[in-house]
Amino acid sequence: MDLHLIPGAEPSAEERAAVDAAVGPPASAWETGERRPDAEGHVAFGGHALRARRHLLLPALWAVQSRVGFITPGALNYVCRRLDVAPADAYGVATFYAMLSVKPQPTTIVHVCDDLACRLAGAPALLDAMRGERGAESVRSSPCLGLCERAPAVLFQCAGEGAKDYVVAPAARTAADEPKPPPPPPPPISSGTRPIEGVGTSIAARLGQGSPSAPQTEDGRRETLRLLARVGRVDPESLDDYRAHGGYRALPKAIAMGPEAIVREAIASKLQGRGGAAFPAGRKWEAVARQPARPHYLVCNADESEPGTFKDRVLMEEDPFALVEAMTIVAFATGCEHGFVYVRGEYPLAEARVRAAIAGARKAGLLGPNVLGSGFAFDIEVRRGAGAYICGEETALFNSIEGYRGEPRNKPPFPVEKGLFGKPTVINNVETLVNVLLVVEMGGDAFAAIGTGASTGPKLFCVSGNVERPGVYEVPFGPTLREVIGLAGGVPGGRAVRAVLLGGAAGSFVGPGELDVPLTFEGTRAIGAALGSGVVMVFDDRADLRDAVRRIAAFFRDESCGQCVPCRVGTERQEELVARLDAGRPLRSTAEEDALLDEIARAMRDASICGLGQTASGAIQSAIRRLGVFSA
Amino acid sequence: MSTARRLDATRPVTLSIDGASVTVPAGSTILEACRSRGIDTPTLCFLENLAPVNVCRVCVVELEGARVLVPACSRPVEADMKIRTDSERVRLSRRMVLEFLASSVDLSLASDDVRRWMERYGADPSRYGPPAPPRAANERDNAGPGHHHAASAGAAANVVQPVKVDNDLYVRDYARCILCYKCVQACGVEAQNTFAIAIAGRGFDARVSTEFATPLPESACVYCGNCIGVCPTGALMFKSEHDLRGAGKWDESRQTVTDTICPYCGVGCTLELRVQDNAIVRVTSPLDHDVTSGHLCIKGRFGWQFVQNRPEE
Ligand code: SF4
Ligand code: SF4
Ligand code: FES
């Protein structure tokens, strides 16, 4: 391919420096560097070796975005030369992600979450207030920022030298109907000093007192907690403190056990994936371990974007070494030398903490060419997403890491066979991975004894919406929905529950008559719902469910990758249909609209490529059918 | 082509399609198996000379034991698969895909097959309400990912927009684009390796675009016209044809097609010259041609003005 660049568009010095920092300095004149006549002669450097670095495309685009605030033609040219990617191709990638811009925009963009939980906490009014104060140019509405326990939430995306993104949540501390614009930015997170929490309390000040994101850790009964045991108690930036709280006990034990034994214990534990698909984790690891093709990759899916989900964020922010240790064990068990953590772009603090933990572990010989002197080599790279829910779909995530648009792949082949870079790949989310520490420490059988038999181990639920104390709650599998809501203090003011959204936008609503469903894989399945990612979002009898349904319809329209027809057009038609129902202006009759929605839903479920399209109607249909949202 | 598949005739695979037993070489797709039985299977994004991208989903079939329908165009056959090509689920999904496209894209220049399939499956694109008004030029090109105006209760969104005419050789009428990805494939890894166009944007706002939606003459386009050759809906069209159609003079009944060999170089590409009123109006090459696989370069595709350089009559 001859690279045809955008005529006359030169990168600025800042842009070059930013890109070079992300992808390394140019190796030859071919890549815009110094010409080295001795080494280069008349030979062009490039070809496969250069194109093999395409996976640096997203980091390079991020570097430009964070430095100058948008991707200029000159910067795009430079990125393309450095990675041998055609400008149209790179432009296609850049325009896929909501946090990247190809048009000039202010250097600070305020993303105001106006998704489900934040709407209940006054997000629309907050959005208006922010627009009034800062100008519409600088303020965007955002899909769920994963801060539902501190709604309403705001993410500041900042560009400039040394600028860092940060969140403010809750952005309004007063009653929901009179939100205040967020306070001026706190000092940016900088390395060396302790990161500042969005709520304004430093980690040091509240260590030992638990975490406001996980209310159970704040009261005295933490002995019951396993996944959250260290949360709010351990210094997330200190390896020593992690060790002092039981960290890095599982890894030496795992290495002594050997890979086969770890997989055996994982299978015995009956641990199932916590991201929504509930696939047996041990089986997945076994399948990858057995693949003859090399290398094997381990990917941690930390693109936690399901509206209402924030448990992985809390684990990464508060106990990041646990993720690093868990990944090391799974990599050892499955023969992976290289791991990736793909963190959603909206989680700057989680990303910073995981990066720091990886660096700390590497320095201590817990990652690297010879982990704990065992001869096992493993290292982890962090990749930052850039605002695309679909990248939580595992094959879309692979494409995103590889430097392509985050479009899901058709399956089969499945990741265990052909995953990242076409190689056998283990992909699990944060919560699933962290469970392996327990499996190794207590043994598979003991782990399987926790829970109900069909759903084993501890489980994190993200309880949000109209509850007294929203947050991440840990229970051994088994309690009912009512009990979990009770853990969070029930509905404020003793009001009645009107509906609960289980599993997020891709899940479904259940009504007040279904509060006694056990929150297990089998229990939710029995009532035609699903556990999904552990979302329990409560709507009381004052909540505007029509508004929630419209938001969900808009969400899928926004987040469809656009690749396949059923989802690309189906999510649009579904949103239009919901708008008609909401406006009380059905085409023909309400009954016919209902039948049409059913056909749209069936086509999306049956013919879409991936889970996004396949689940895009579930919550909406459940709201209409179970709750009669548009009937009254 | 980068993705040539290998069929292995020494390893026959037997499966069942609509109750009948079918045997095809290993490596065949379900689509090939269906076609070997003469089952008319609709396809839009599939083309024999490109790797299947399986995005339009009009070819879906029901595979026993699978949770969802599977795309026939890309799914390789396996022994003892049980396939149904005309079940209620299959018919519904095919009808909906055709309705979704016909209600959002101008399909008036798509092949007669499309009309036949729409009839067969009873597609009624009008049931989504009146179409939304056309978009301004470049409006869709500027749509950012993840942000859209809330859907209107009154009108069905679509991709209607002005034609892009920015060079003398071909036009891009994206009001007709079904986003089948074929032009992107042909411009990229599958044929031309130029990568002048890519899919940009996301969701309903996804579109085929050059970098920054720059006009073709400033882009990397080399005018091989291979994208035109694969476009199934007339979205990419010779300027000569576009002008004749615009003037109301395009008339297929007055056209002939003549096969010849390109005179320019030693490769020897076969050209099919479509001629109306003694003037060449479009040039293609047969998809199954073993030299071209349907692909040409700018000279064969567009370099024929000299043969009709006649003195003014
Ligand atoms: S179902 Fe939606 S998100 Fe998934 S591949 Fe298709 S268009 Fe993309
Ligand atoms: S322009 Fe034609 S070939 Fe290209 S994606 Fe659209 S319909 Fe397909
Ligand atoms: S022809 Fe199979 S998905 Fe388009």
Image (cartoon, coloured by chain):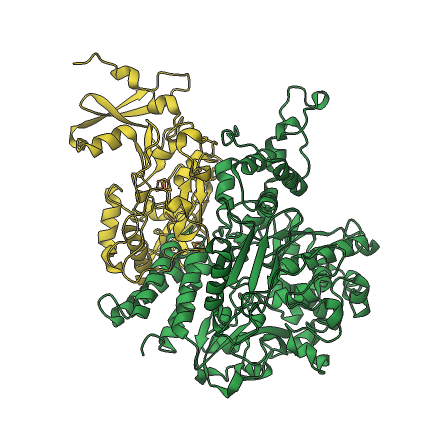
Q: What percent of the width, then of the height, locates residue B163?
A: 30, 38
Taking the view exactly as shown, the residue that stands out farthest to the front is A133
Q: What percent of the width, then of the height, locates residue B17?
A: 35, 54
Q: What percent of the width, then of the height, locates residue B46?
A: 37, 43
Closer to the camera in the image, A426 or B127: B127
**Which quadrant, please, contains the C terminus of chain A?**
bottom left
In the displayed structure image, the side of residue B200 where residue A232 appears, left or right: right
Rendered hue of chain A is green
Taking the view exactly as shown, the residue that stands out farthest to the bottom is A494
State which image quarter holds ligand 2: top left
Closer to the camera in the image, A50 or A395: A50
Closer to the camera in the image, B24 or B145: B145
Chain appearing in yellow on the rendered image: B
Instruction: Determine the image quadrant of residue B242.
Output: top left
Residue at 43% over, 47% down: B74
Q: As displayed, is residue A491 above or below residue A142?
A: below
In the displayed structure image, the side of residue B199 where residue A202 appears, left or right: right
Instruction: Determine the image quadrant of residue A40.
Output: top right
Closer to the camera in the image, A34 or B227: A34
Taking the view exactly as shown, the residue that stands out farthest to the top is B311
Instruction: Determine the image quadrant of residue A471.
Output: bottom right
Residue at 40% over, 44% down: B141
Q: How many marks?
A: 0
Q: From where the camera sits, is residue A418 visible?
A: no
Q: From where the camera sits, is residue B245 visible?
A: yes
Q: What percent of the width, then of the height, locates residue A130?
A: 50, 62
